[in-house]
Image: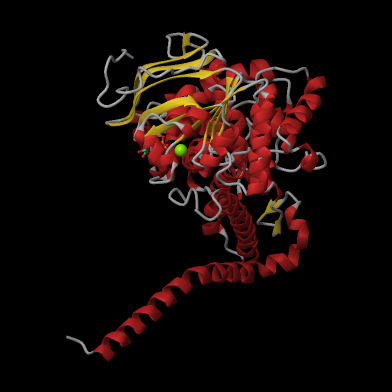
C-alpha cells in the first residue's frame, strides 16, 4: 500500500487546480489512489477531496472506473480476488486501509446504493429494518418509527405503508430502488454512495430521487455516480469527471460545466464523445 | 456421398430413434408403477389400508402389516437428516463463502467422491468400524446424559436404528452438500454485497442474506437427501438389525422398507407374502418419487429454470 509519487498518466494538469473548494470541509479524501483488477489497472492516481454535506457527482463514460472508485470507498473490493491498490483514501482524516481498521464499522458509516436495485427477498419492513437490527441501532420499540422515517425520507412511505408485509422484491423497479435507499438511510450512515441509482428508473421516479438527494444532503454526504449529465448539473454541488481510469477534472459543478479546465471534460459534457 | 434426399431421410430416422429413446425413459416410471401395483393388488385387496398401521408380520399365519418398516424407514431417515444437514450445510457454506480459493475444488471433489463409494462398502465399514465406535465412544456418554429419555432405552448390541441412521447420514452428506453448494453459488453477489455494505460481517451476510435467498433450494437439497435416505438399502440392512418391531429407542434393532424387500424376497414363497412385499415396494416407490419430485422442483425454482444443482443430481 505504498504511496506513489507519479503515476503513468494521472495528475498531470490537476495539481495546480483547487481540489476542494473551501465552503465544505472534506469528509473523504482520495490521495493518489490507484487500483488494479489483477494485471489491469482500473484507476490511476485518483486524488480529490469530497466535501461534507454536499452532493458530489462522478460522471464519465462507461468503463472509466467510477464504480471501481465508489466501491473502493467502502472497501467492497476486499472480496474481489486479485484486487490491489496503491495510494490512500481517508475518512475524516484517517486511512480506511490502516491496519486494524474495522471494515464492518466503516461500511456502517458509509452506506451504498447499488446500480441495480438489490432488495432482500424479505418483507418491505424487514428490508428497511435490516441495518438497525444488524447493528443494534434501535430498541425493538423504536424500530417501526425508524422504518417509517427511512421510508418517508426515501419518498416511498405513501406507496408502501399498507404493503409493509409484502416482499421487497414484489415492488416496481423504481420502488425497489427507493427501498434500497431507505434501507441504506435506516442505517444512518454519514456518507451515502450511490452508483447510478436512477439508471433503471423512469423520469418520474428519477425526479423523486433527485428531490430526495437535495433534501438528504442536509444530513448526509452524498457521492453519486451518474452518466446523466443533466442530473449532475441539477443536483450536484461538486462534480468529478472520470476518463479511462483518471479523474480528469474535479471541482464545483458550476465551474466544471461552464468553464472546464480539461478539454476532455469539455468534449464529454458537450456530447462530443461518451 | 449420399443424395440430398437420402441425408434428409437418415436425419428423420435418426430423430425418430432419438425421440423413441427419449420417451422410453419416462414411460419406464409408469411401467414400474403399473407392475408394482398389479402385483401388489392381492395384498391391497386382502389387507386394505390397515396394512399401513398394523405391526404383525407373520408369514406362517399369512398376516402382514408394514407399520414397523414404515416407522423404521422414516425414523432412520429423520435421524440421518438430523445429523447430515448441519454437517452438509457447514461444508457447503465453508466451501462457497469462507474457504481459501485453492481449497474449494479439492474439498468439493472429495466430498462428492463419498457418493461414489458402493453401498455395501459402507455397510461393511458400518459393521467393523462404526458399530464398535458407537459402542465404545458414543452410546455410553449418550446414555449417561439422556438415558432417562425413551430414545435410549435397552442394551445396545450394535445393529440398531442408531447405526442405520448414522450410516445413512454419512451417505447422504455428499448429496446435500453438493446441491447446497450449487444453490449458494447461484445466490447473486448483489445480495451478499447488499448485506456487507450495511455493515454485516461475512457470517452475518451469509446468515441474513445468502441463506434466506437460497432457502427454497436448500430445502430442496435436504429433501433430495431424504429421498436418498428413504430408498437406501444395502448399507442399512447390514447395520439396522432387521427386526419387525417398533421401538422408540435408537439402541434397538429396526427395519426399513427397502431392507425388508431385499432380505425377504427370496424367502417369499407364497403368493400373499410376495404380494405384501410388492405392496411395500409400491409404497416405497411412491414415497421416494414424491419426495424427489418435491426436491427437484424446489431446487429448480431457486435459479428460475437455470437448473441449479443439475450437475449433482
Ligand atoms: N471485477 C472486475 N474484474 C476485472 N475488471 C473489472 C472488474 N470490474 C470492472 N472491471 C474493469 O474496470 C474498468 C472500470 O470499470 P467500472 O469501474 O465498472 O467503470 P464504470 O463504473 O465507470 O462504468 C472497466 O474496464 C471494467 O471492465
Ligand atoms: Mg459503473
Q: Camera-side residue: B14 or B152?
A: B14
Is B31 located above or below residue B144 in the figure?
below
Is A49 located above or below residue B223 in the figure?
above
Q: Is residue A60 left or right of residue A119?
A: left
Q: Residue at x 63, y 65 (%)?
A: B275
Location of the N terminus of chain B (image quadrant): bottom left
Residue B91 picture location, percent across and down: 48, 31
**How many marks can you see?**
0
In which quarter of the view is residue B165 placed?
Answer: top right
Query: Can residue B200 be seen here?
Result: yes
In which quarter of the view is residue B14 placed?
Answer: bottom left
Q: Residue at x 31, y 25 (%)?
A: A10
Residue B261 picture location, percent across and down: 56, 55
Query: Can residue B164 be seen here?
Result: no
Q: Residue at x 44, y 31 (%)?
A: A259
| Colour setting | secondary structure
Q: Is residue A160 left or right of residue A206?
A: right
Residue B221 picture location, percent across and down: 55, 44
Q: Residue at x 66, y 16 (%)?
A: B145
Residue B16 picture location, percent across and down: 40, 81
Residue positioned most to the front: A259
Q: Camera-side residue: B152 or B97?
A: B97
Q: Camera-side residue: B126 or A120?
A: A120
Is A22 located above or below residue B133 in the figure?
above
Amino acid at each position: 500500500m505504498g504511496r506513489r509519487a507519479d503515476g503513468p498518466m494521472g495528475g498531470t494538469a490537476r495539481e495546480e487546480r483547487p481540489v476542494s473548494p473551501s465552503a465544505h470541509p472534506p469528509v473523504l479524501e482520495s490521495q493518489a489512489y490507484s487500483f488494479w483488477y489483477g494485471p489491469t489497472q482500473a484507476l490511476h492516481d485518483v486524488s480529490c477531496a469530497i466535501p461534507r454535506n454536499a452532493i458530489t457527482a462522478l460522471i464519465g463514460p462507461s468503463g472509466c472506473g467510477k464504480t471501481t472508485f465508489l466501491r473502493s470507498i467502502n472497501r467492497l473490493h476486499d472480496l474481489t480476488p486479485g484486487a490491489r491498490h496503491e495510494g490512500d483514501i481517508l475518512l475524516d482524516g484517517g486511512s480506511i486501509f490502516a491496519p486494524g481498521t474495522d471494515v464492518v464499522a466503516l461500511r456502517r458509516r458509509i452506506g451504498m446504493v447499488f446500480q441495480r436495485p438489490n432488495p432482500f427477498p424479505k418483507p418491505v419492513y424487514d428490508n428497511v429494518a435490516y441495518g438497525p437490527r444488524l447493528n443494534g441501532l434501535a430498541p425493538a420499540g423504536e424500530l417501526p418509527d425508524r422504518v417509517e422515517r427511512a421510508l418517508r425520507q426515501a419518498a416511498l412511505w405513501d406507496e408502501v405503508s399498507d404493503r409493509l408485509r409484502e416482499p421487497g422484491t414484489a415492488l416496481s423497479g423504481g420502488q425497489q430502488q427507493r427501498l434500497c435507499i431507505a434501507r441504506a438511510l435506516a442505517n444512518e450512515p454519514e456518507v451515502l454512495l450511490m452508483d447510478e441509482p436512477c439508471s433503471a428508473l423512469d423520469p418520474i421516479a428519477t425526479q423523486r430521487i433527485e428531490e430526495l438527494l437535495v433534501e438528504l444532503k442536509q444530513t448526509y454526504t452524498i457521492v453519486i455516480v451518474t452518466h446523466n449529465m443533466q442530473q449532475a448539473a441539477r443536483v450536484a454541488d461538486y462534480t468529478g469527471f472520470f476518463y479511462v481510469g483518471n479523474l480528469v477534472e474535479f471541482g464545483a459543478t458550476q465551474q466544471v460545466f461552464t468553464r472546464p479546465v480539461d478539454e476532455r471534460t469539455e468534449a464529454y459534457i458537450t456530447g462530443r464523445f461518451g | 456421398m449420399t443424395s440430398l434426399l437420402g441425408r434428409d431421410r437418415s436425419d428423420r430416422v435418426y430423430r425418430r430413434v432419438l425421440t423413441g429413446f427419449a420417451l422410453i425413459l419416462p414411460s419406464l416410471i409408469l411401467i414400474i408403477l403399473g407392475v408394482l401395483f398389479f402385483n401388489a393388488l392381492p395384498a391391497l385387496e386382502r389387507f386394505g389400508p390397515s396394512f399401513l398401521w398394523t405391526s404383525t408380520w407373520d408369514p406362517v399365519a399369512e398376516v402382514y402389516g408394514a407399520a414397523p418398516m414404515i416407522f423404521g424407514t422414516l425414523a432412520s431417515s429423520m435421524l440421518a437428516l438430523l445429523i447430515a444437514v448441519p454437517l452438509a450445510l457447514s461444508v457447503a457454506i465453508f466451501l462457497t463463502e469462507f474457504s481459501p480459493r485453492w481449497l474449494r475444488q479439492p474439498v468439493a471433489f472429495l466430498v462428492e467422491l463419498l457418493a461414489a463409494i458402493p453401498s455395501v462398502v459402507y455397510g461393511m465399514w458400518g459393521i467393523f468400524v462404526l458399530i464398535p465406535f458407537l459402542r465404545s465412544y458414543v452410546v455410553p456418554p449418550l446414555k449417561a446424559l439422556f438415558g432417562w429419555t425413551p430414545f435410549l432405552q435397552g442394551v445396545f448390541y450394535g445393529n440398531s436404528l442408531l447405526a442405520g441412521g448414522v450410516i445413512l447420514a454419512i451417505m447422504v452428506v455428499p448429496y446435500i452438500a453438493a446441491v447446497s453448494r450449487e444453490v449458494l453459488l447461484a445466490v447473486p453477489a448483489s445480495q451478499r454485497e447488499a448485506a456487507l455494505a450495511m455493515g454485516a460481517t461475512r457470517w452475518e451476510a451469509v446468515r441474513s442474506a445468502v441463506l434466506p435467498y437460497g432457502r427454497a433450494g436448500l430445502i430442496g437439497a435436504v429433501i433430495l437427501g431424504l429421498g436418498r435416505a428413504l430408498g437406501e438399502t444395502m448399507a442399512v440392512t447390514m447395520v439396522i438389525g432387521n427386526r419387525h418391531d417398533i421401538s422408540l429407542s435408537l439402541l434397538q434393532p429396526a427395519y426399513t422398507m427397502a431392507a425388508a424387500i431385499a432380505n425377504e424376497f427370496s424367502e417369499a414363497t407364497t403368493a400373499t407374502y410376495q404380494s405384501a412385499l410388492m405392496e411395500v415396494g409400491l409404497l416405497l416407490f411412491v414415497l421416494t418419487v414424491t419426495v424427489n419430485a418435491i426436491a427437484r422442483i424446489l431446487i429448480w425454482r431457486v435459479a428460475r429454470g437455470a437448473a441449479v444443482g443439475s450437475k449433482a443430481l
